[in-house]
Amino acid sequence: MKNKRKVNNNVLLMIAKLYERLSDISAKDRQIYYAGLNYEDIFQDTILRVSTDEKAAIITDENEFVEYFIYRMKAAQYTIIKDSKRLKITDYADNLQAKDNEEKGE
């Protein structure tokens, strides 16, 4: 992730305080893998994204913070799913060459 914004310490404290709750609530897809990433990868990426998020810095209510965190995690999952679908349909030069060789009987 190439984010030049600084980490907000208050957000990190809120994440630390609510870590178990965030992990339990957002764990519905623990066994699903998207583009080689599992739940923990997406969860940790969300922590990084939220820790530098200006909107998260102004949230003081725990329930509102949890809702915002889950929203950001779903957004990260959506992006990863879209990227993995795009990779599945992209023809790379090696794949095209392999198809040509198969058609020619090589």
Image (spheres, rainbow, N blue to C red):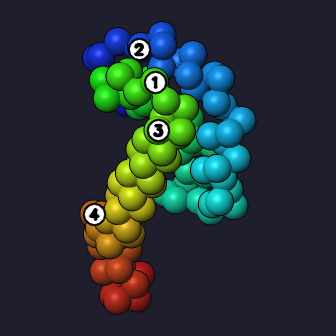
What residue sits 35% from the left and 62% below the top?
82
Residue 21: % across, % down: 68, 39
Q: State the SS at label 4.
A: helix
Name the secondary structure under disc 1.
loop
Q: Is residue 39 visible?
A: no
* Residue type, mark 1 in image: Thr
Q: Contact, CB < 8 Å: mark 2 with mark 1?
A: no
The mark lying in front, picked from 2 and 1, is: 1
Question: Gap in Å between the C-alphas at discs 4 and 3?
Answer: 47 Å
Labels 2 and 1: the sequence-earlier one: 2
Mark 2 vs mark 3: give the one in front: 3
Q: Alpha carbon of mark 3 to alpha carbon of mark 1: how far?
A: 8 Å
Disc 2 target residue: 7
Q: Which residue is mark 3?
A: 64
Task: State which mark lies toward you, 2 or 4.
Answer: 2
Q: Nearer the viewer, mark 4 or mark 3?
A: 3
Residue underneath mark 1: 60
Helix, strand, or loop for circle 2?
loop
x, y percentage for residue 7? Answer: 41, 14
Count the marks.
4
**Residue at image location 53% in from the left, 44% down from the top:** 42
Quadrant in which residue 6 is drawn: top left
Marks 4 and 1, how far apart in space? 51 Å
Q: Are marks 3 and 1 in contact (CB under 8 Å)?
A: yes
* Alpha carbon distance from label 2 to label 1: 16 Å
* Quarter placement of the C terminus: bottom left
Q: What residue is shown with label 4?
A: 93
